[in-house]
Amino acid sequence: MQLSRPLRAALAGTLAAAVLPLAASTNAAARGEAPSSSGATGAVKRPKSLVIGVDGATFASFDKAKMPRVKGLMAGGMTATNNLYANPMAPTSSGPGWSSVATGAWPDKHKVVDNSFNGARPDLYPDYATRLEAADPALDTLVVGTWAPIRDTVFGPAVDTRLGGVSDADTTATAVSRLKTTDVEAAFVHLDEVDGAGHYYGTAHRAYLDALNKADTQIGQILDAVASRPTYADEDWQIVVTADHGHLPNGGHGGNSPGERQTFVIAKGTGFAPGSVRHDVKVTDIAPTVLAHFGVAADPAWQLDGKAIGTLAPDAFDALRPALNTRADELALPAALKGWTTTPPSGWTIDNTAMPAGGITEWRGWSFATDEFWSNTDLGQGRETNVRARDVFAVADSDEWDDKSHGGGPFDSTLTSPAFAVSGGAPATVSYATTYKVDGPQTGDVHISFDGGPRQLLRSYRADHNAYEKLTVAVPPGVTTARLHFHYTGTNSAFWTIDQVSLTP
């Protein structure tokens, strides 16, 4: 649907509270201008964005398929695999998946939990193209999708042009035409037929691989359309390919198996090193990454879960990845999968003096793990909702630890941070991502101590909680350091995860 400029401007006005306006210099960048030191403007490449969504594309099947165009993007840019949620947050379905891609938030925020879209909150979490239109109505946005809800629901009416295709061939032809002949600046293209093959055949069937290769050819046609633009040399294209969910070997999705939950972000353009592989990127990072490409900074008030990929930085836990171990007692996991350690990073300590002997080796006291390892130890117990952790995170899991005989008493372990520098008499901010789930007797307490003094309670958890925490701390006069202490106890209950811990003056 093509909207007039006046209507676009009016729609943008209604969304003013939901977006950050572009600064004057940012608007100049979006137009292809950049302020110089003298205040004059000089020509720079104009930012352009193309996101291609391949419904139901299972990344683990890519090696079995040829897919030369997608693999060319991987060689020329960044590849990151990541896992989706599962129930009770939402099933691995298209509605929640594409809404997470488009909004930069997980289903517990955007409220799309199935393909009906009932209860969705686009007023709080609009799609990224809508945010672009609100920031600068002059930008030309385009959505072309084979699955009708992509153009009708996932992306809102503020988008300039929303078109459908009766097949992926039709969608591809429409996208190619628009990319060749119009000055589109931000485009989203959705291909649907890989998902159909996943439902009918499953990932183990040759027909599914054929569908991936057909999609790869269509992606190539779309990429060629971009490269053939007369103005291509003057444009800065950011290309992203992703999926909403995977599939089972025998067909279907919606559950919590690794094949259904794994998705991916492939990105090529400025800032993405050729052939790079990352473990900290999520599909919710796509929306803020596109916004950042046009100079639109995410307002903290938006409460997005995703971050612009260029702003992501590893934390101390991520540095443990090279030292992660294969399974010890978790024999249901693949023998070659590395994903856990109980050795903390430099400066961090674990106090297990109150821990009984025995139990599952991987989870005796606080451990450090990847989602691929930890969440697949026992499916359907809520571990799949730990979507706000990235790469390697800290976990205390009394439920899984209890699955092997151990000495008397509950799980009881404390994780302590290094000493953070603080300014005495000035407030400080404690931040971390956490998922706390209860299924029996359990406590989770965060304490802070200053200059090695007594611990003071900062935050207690006694009910399920899944969030990015940001706590303001009053720092006593005269002190220079502070440590955080995460104390967890549980009697065959559930778990507590911690990640991205910071304490800033």
Image (cartoon, rainbow, N blue to C red):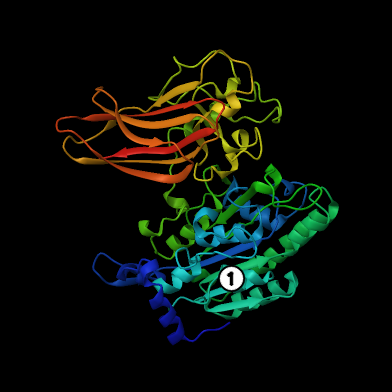
Q: Out of 222 and 232, give the one closest to the viewer.
A: 222
Question: Is 55 drawn above or below residue 24 in the view shown?
Answer: above
In the figure, 437 relative to 217: above or below?
above
- Any part of residue 227 in sight: no
The N terminus lies in quadrant:
bottom right
Nearer-the-camera pick, 485 or 328:
485
**How many tags in the picture?**
1
Q: Indicate left or right for 258 with 465 as reference.
A: right
Q: Nearer the viewer, residue 108 or 431?
A: 108
The residue where tag 1 is placed is: 153
The residue positioned 56% from the left and 66% from the top of the image is 50
Percent position of residue 150, x then y: 62, 69
> Please, is residue 47 above or below residue 283 in the view?
below
Residue name at image x 60 percent, y 61 percent? 98
Q: Determine crowd level at label 1: few under 14, some 14-19, many 20+ residues with C-alpha closer than 10 A.
A: some
Give, as a three-letter code, the residue at label 1.
Answer: Thr
Q: x%, y% of residue 390?
A: 50, 42
Which residue of the protein is positioned furthest toward the front in this rendering?
441
Residue 20 seen in render: yes
Which residue is at 65% across, 47% downward? 261
- Work out whether 492 lies above or below 69: above
Q: In which quarter of the image is residue 232?
A: bottom right
- The quadrant in which the C terminus is found is top left
200 or 114, which is in the foreground? 114
